[in-house]
Amino acid sequence: MTQEDPLTAGLNPQQREAVTFPDQNVLVLAGAGSGKTRVLTSRIAWLIREGRARPSGILAVTFTNKASREMLERIERQMPGVSTRGMWVGTFHGLCNRLLRVHAAEAGLQPSFQIIDQADQLSVVKRVMKAAGVGKETIEPRAVQNYISRMKEEGLRASEVKGPDMHTANAAVALQLYRAYERLCVEEGIVDFAELLLRSYELLQRNELIRRHYEQRFSHILVDEFQDTNVLQYRWLKTLAGYGRGPVREEGAANTIFAVGDDDQSIYAFRGANVGNMDDFRRELGVRKVIRLEQNYRSTGHILGAANALIGCNTKRLGKNLWTDAGEGSRIQVMPCPSGEAEARFVAEEIESGHSRGRAYRDFAVLYRSNAQSRAIESVLMAGGIPYRIYGGHRFFERAHVKDVLAYLRLVENPSDNTAFLRAVNTPARGVGAKTLEKLAETARAADLSLMGAVSEMKGAAASKLRGFGELVMGIRRAASGRSLTDLVRIVLERSTLKAYYADLDRREKSAKAEDLAEIVNAAAAFLKSADIDPEADAMEPRGEDELSPLSSFLALATLEAGDNQAGAEADAVQLMTVHAAKGLEFPVVFITGLEENLFPHVSSLREGGQAGREEERRLMYVAITRAKRELYLTYAARRFINGTYQNEQQSSFLDEIPREHLVWRRSPAGLSEEAGAWDEGGGRRGAASARGGWAGRRSGDEDSGQERASYGYSWRPRGADSSYNGSKTEPLLKKRTEAGWSAGQHVRHPKFGKGVVISVSGSGALTKVQVAFAGAGVKQLLAAMAKLEKI
DNA sequence: GTCTAGTTAATTTTT
DNA sequence: TTAACTAGAC
């Protein structure tokens, strides 16, 4: 009986239908929290167990490394004893990289091609512009970069672009630069992210033999987050599945695509995602069945009711309604605040009160539309000694000082890597400036050499400095010959003098960059371990036929998986992140902050995208709401410090779109000034017409004007005093007072981490440990006796 | 060549 | 506010 089947037991009927669906193309519309990952992995396990696919016949694609890691782990758990080795589970870019490394020659690439990230790509674009004599007053480098990426994502080479692009001013110039950029990338053997996709797509299109091979191999293709695919990714999938050329193949002749997605959670149109792929997929590949996963296992009724109603305001939808049998739960709390700072204090106070009732800090997430909003919240959490962690920001291998080291490694791997050369040559400063580099570039161009190659051709005063740099890199190569990857990294750190340079900088700026540099050695060791490479293997020696050197593989991985910055992910800390970053996550308690018109929905979206922009913002709000499991707060402020000035704000129109039965309005702090206007705490807006007035003055006679008691402890302060407010309200948050004079709430300074606040104290005597939240470095555990902590 | 003071603009972001 | 970039002084 199916009930006994461990693979399908516990699945609801729709999930089960998806998991055990016949071998046809199918679209699974998976609502938020509907158990989509489980369906995907169970599907794979089921296909293999039923003998419909061999592990090597499975291709499963995700967008993020995290998602693919999770998927692989879950598959392995679900089919113990079955090897997943032959499966291709990875990101689009990861899989394309794999494909291109194997078939580099056929794809017209050097086998050890370098992958460049966005920042590198921008500097290449700038270089191209300079060489072409195009200044930034003609066209912004960033616009050129966007243009190139967009063209590639539509599958267009410079030679294939037809009309001028409507979205780009000076599209003709952009096209010229695209052409030059293509040439330069080929010459230097560099490949950007979009190029990974386009190259491997073209490879499959043009090389019959290779296409056949993979077509025959991958009988089952599974795609996660299908709504986020761009045009090129969709074509890539079709090609692999055997639909790449000509009309739709005969039933049963092609491979099948199992696409899982949610059009309501499409929030990446701005980077090329095309929701239309869902419709195209259905139409073009003859999808006869759309399975809807609408039962939600995450949230309670009021939260889902709000989400459903809100997203119902969108016009273009495939249609879906989430439901739960978990009960109504508590209503959503709406909190109007006089200022952004007051909003932050409200959030902190609610968190602290929840924490004192037994909730862990990690159960709380504070979401915002734009990163700048985190500052106000951070400072209040910091002052209150509440540990927090910010998601996002620069990841390990994207940090400038880490990329400096990588540039040297890239030069060691390939001395003609001009991008790396330009980065490394004057970092740390060694007297090689713009003039010298211009001359060098000219020499290189004339002699058809790489920058490094042209160094020996240079004459004059600057030449000796350049030659010194060339010898430095060659010296590193010689010293590293026969040595392991970790040794190589150590050698680079020493000889480049980056280690000393950043150690010195850290002393002056109280930063901790040198620590990151040392961490690269660990990252290299971890890489060797996870890739199953002998830790003593020669870093520069290819490991076998068709295999890259450990160094090459490490560099590719560093770009492709820039590494999370989740240091301290285990710590019990409040989670701060943008709504985008929250996608795919869930939390018991969620605060959605800054619910103001022009902030959320964001003005730029409205301005550029019109109605479509508003709809994407609404989907973003939908994503935000559906992150909450138990409790949801919506907050907004009358005044907010944005772009250096205070601005008067109006509440978000999204608030009007949530039926009032799901909401409970919290009372705003007392003493609200007249200029800040009224709070509509009675139960939302009283009709859209009057509501549009936003914060405009309250009609006299309203019962709650004037001196109303605040529902929580803060009293509202006039602005000015407000922004620096750091007063008595932090005091009640402090509880533990311990020996050695350390106590939670103590402000401290650390030579490396800078200023911070003690969050907790544990242990005693010499083993007294303090947990400190630092402004720049996050939360750290320190031994009080050892760390050079200074009370301030 | 390098350092510093002044100007400008301002979502969201994974690979 | 702040980060990124440019112009001008040393």
Image (cartoon, coloured by chain):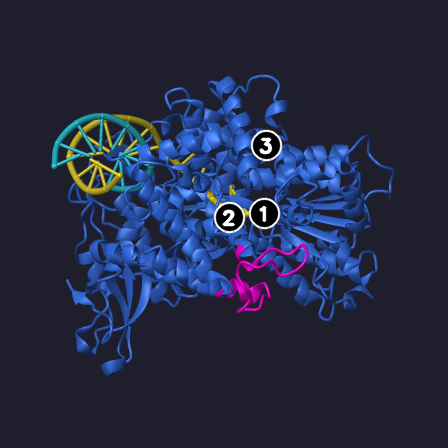
Chain colours: A blue, B yellow, C cyan
**Residue A187 picture location, percent across and down:** 55, 36
Q: In the picture, residue A161 is in which quadrant?
A: top right
Mark sitting earlier along the chain (3/2): 3
Q: Locate the N terminus of chain A by quadrant.
A: bottom right
The residue mark sitting in front, 1 or 2, is 2
- Which residue is at 52% across, 33% downward? A184
The answer to whether residue A80 is left or right of residue A778 is: right
The answer to whether residue A8 is left or right of residue A755 is: right
Q: Are marks 3 and 1 in contact (CB under 8 Å)?
A: no
Task: Give me the chain letter of mark 1.
Answer: A
Who is closer to the viewer here, A555 or A36? Answer: A555
Q: Which residue is mark 1?
A: A63
- Which residue is at 54% across, 45% downward? A114
Above or below A84: residue A602? above
Gap between marks 3 and 2 measured at Cα: 26 Å
Q: Which residue is mark 2?
A: A414
